[in-house]
Amino acid sequence: MYERMLDKQNEPSFNDLIHYCGESGSLWLEFDKYLENEYSAQKQVRFPYGKHYGWSVKYSRKSKHICDVFAENNAFTVFAKISNDNFRAINENLSDYSKKIYEHKYPCGNGGWINFRVLSRDHLIDIIEIIRTKINPQRSIER
């Protein structure tokens, strides 16, 4: 249903990745613009973590990894490491969907890695709030 781009031999462009996401591509473009404007994020198309993850865009600020975004058929998934302390600070503001994703994180140190599939504007707002816990931007977002 949410198949990823798994052909390592054919590197897609950023626009190819957006197009692959279907209607969710516009949400990814909004997320991309947010990361660019608030963090001056650099982006790199890459095929990380092995053959089952597929093509993604790595977003970073200087040497700090912000997240990877994986193109999926009609969706995209944000892969990011979040600490327990940061998540607790925003937990009450997040949807049940987001809380469930964090409950099923891959544990690592004081927190873990989340695979956050974005399917709606509400999901986009939540993942932006989660990313804000990693690196604090200078402006606030509108809900």
Image: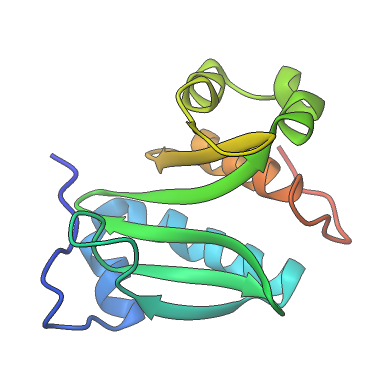
On-image quarter of the C terminus: top right
Q: Is residue 116 above or below residue 4?
A: above
Instruction: Tell me which residue sits at (83%, 55%) in the image.
Output: 136
Residue 99 located left or right of residue 3: right
User: Quadrant of residue 11 in the image?
Assistant: bottom left
Residue 127 x, y percent position in the rendering? 58, 42
Instruction: Tell me which residue sits at (18%, 61%) in the image.
Output: 51
Residue 47 located left or right of residue 79: left
State the colouring used for the structure image. rainbow
Count of marks placed on residues: 0
Residue 32 x, y percent position in the rendering? 54, 67
Q: Residue furthest right?
A: 138
User: Quadrant of residue 28 in the image?
Assistant: bottom left
Instruction: Tell me which residue sits at (14%, 64%) in the image.
Output: 6
Residue 50 x, y percent position in the rendering? 25, 62
Residue 57 x, y percent position in the rendering? 42, 70
Instruction: Tell me which residue sits at (52%, 78%) in the image.
Output: 43
On-image quarter of the N terminus: top left
Q: Is residue 142 above or below residue 55?
A: above
User: Quadrant of residue 27 in the image?
Assistant: bottom left
Q: Is residue 99 above or below residue 138?
A: above
Q: Is residue 56 above or below residue 90?
A: below
